[in-house]
Image (tube, rainbow, N blue to C red):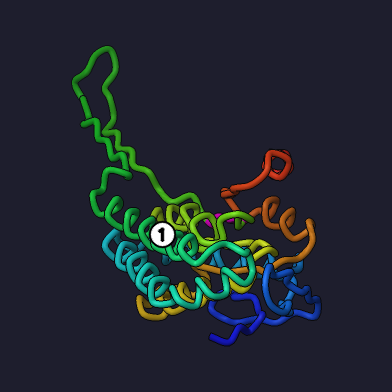
């Protein structure tokens, strides 16, 4: 697979004037478009535009989507093992195992939402004759919160990054996702993003349900975390990085 070195914003592979070079453990560096605050805004807006339609899909539709992503990821395992090894220096067996863990997480969440327990649905019937005051009919159910930002992890290029557990759980719940890819493995992130894009097309999901922003400075991450349309953040990484994101969220 020939890498494009671009962002994926709402179904479109998007270039940018700013660029950065990868720092692979083996082989020549590759050039990638770098994230900007404007791209973060575009991705967040696209996620918000997709939210109503995606959050209204059935658990069966979302489960099929998650399984389709898992199939597309598995179909690219040789490419992921090759590019992942070049970028990170991790051994082939580790990367193939982590690819399986990634697709396994997607399938696990697909099975989980089909069971319906995640909705935590409750119903307290009305008691019109209750004294001293009647009780209204009360219903409660878990609902999708809105667009979610996910930060890729440096040491897990697959299972805790582009289509990892944070992304899988958000998509399962009905929330569009904007991933901030980690600069340590942008090629791996692009391959996984291509797998998600293929699943979006196959399952006829709104294109804004997923976007990938590659690299960029600290201001890009800050723009995502503090964007008024982003309702939650998933992060795996250092205490310092997590604390910085926590403070921005607060």
- The residue carrying pointer 1 sits among few (fewer than 14), some (14 to 19) or many (20 or more) residues within 10 Å by Cα, namely many
Q: In percent of the image, x 66 and y 80: which residue is there?
A: 5
Please, is residue 242 above or below residue 158 in the view? above
Q: On the rendered image, what quadrant is the C terminus found in? A: top right
Q: Determine which quarter of the picture holds residue 6.
A: bottom right
Q: In screen coordinates, is 26 left or right of 2?
A: right
Q: Considering depth in this image, is 33 or 248 the residue closer to the camera?
A: 33
Q: Quadrant of residue 19?
A: bottom right
Does residue 97 appear anywhere in the picture?
yes
Q: Which residue is at a point 42% across and 66% down the rendered structure image?
A: 53
As drawn, the residue found furthest toward the bottom would be 2
- The answer, for residue 189, to whether it is visible in the render is no
Residue 148 part of the magenta segment: yes
Element class at badge 1: helix
Q: How many marks?
A: 1
Measuring from the top left, give residue 128's x and y in whole percent. 21, 25
Q: Is residue 124 left or right of residue 52?
A: left
Q: For the point 41% across and 80% down, which residue is it?
A: 201
| Residue corresponding to mark 1 | 55
Q: Which residues are magenta?
A: 147-151
**Going by the image, does 194 lie left or right of 97?**
right
């Amino acid at each position: 697979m020939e890498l494009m070195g671009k962002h994926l914003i709402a179904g479109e592979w998007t270039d940018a004037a700013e660029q950065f070079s990868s720092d692979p453990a083996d082989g020549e560096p590759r050039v990638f478009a770098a994230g900007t605050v404007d791209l973060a805004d575009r991705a967040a807006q696209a996620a918000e535009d997709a939210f109503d339609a995606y959050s209204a899909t059935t658990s069966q539709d979302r489960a099929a989507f998650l399984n389709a992503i898992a199939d597309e990821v598995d179909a690219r395992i040789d490419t992921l093992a090759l590019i992942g090894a070049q970028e990170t220096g991790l051994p082939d067996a580790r990367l193939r195992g982590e690819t399986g863990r990634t697709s396994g997480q997607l399938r696990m969440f697909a099975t989980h939402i089909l069971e319906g327990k995640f909705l935590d649905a409750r119903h307290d019937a009305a008691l019109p004759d209750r004294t001293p005051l009647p009780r209204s009919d009360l219903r409660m159910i878990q609902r999708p919160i809105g667009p979610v930002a996910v930060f890729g992890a440096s040491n897990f290029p697959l299972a805790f990054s582009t289509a990892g557990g944070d992304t899988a759980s958000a998509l399962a719940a009905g929330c569009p996702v904007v991933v901030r890819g980690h600069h340590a493995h942008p090629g791996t992130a692009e391959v996984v993003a291509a797998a998600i894009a293929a699943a979006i097309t196959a399952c006829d999901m709104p294109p804004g349900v997923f976007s990938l922003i590659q690299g960029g400075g600290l201001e890009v991450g800050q723009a995502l975390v503090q964007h008024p349309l982003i309702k939650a953040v998933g992060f795996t990484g250092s205490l310092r990085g997590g604390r910085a994101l926590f403070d921005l969220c607060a």
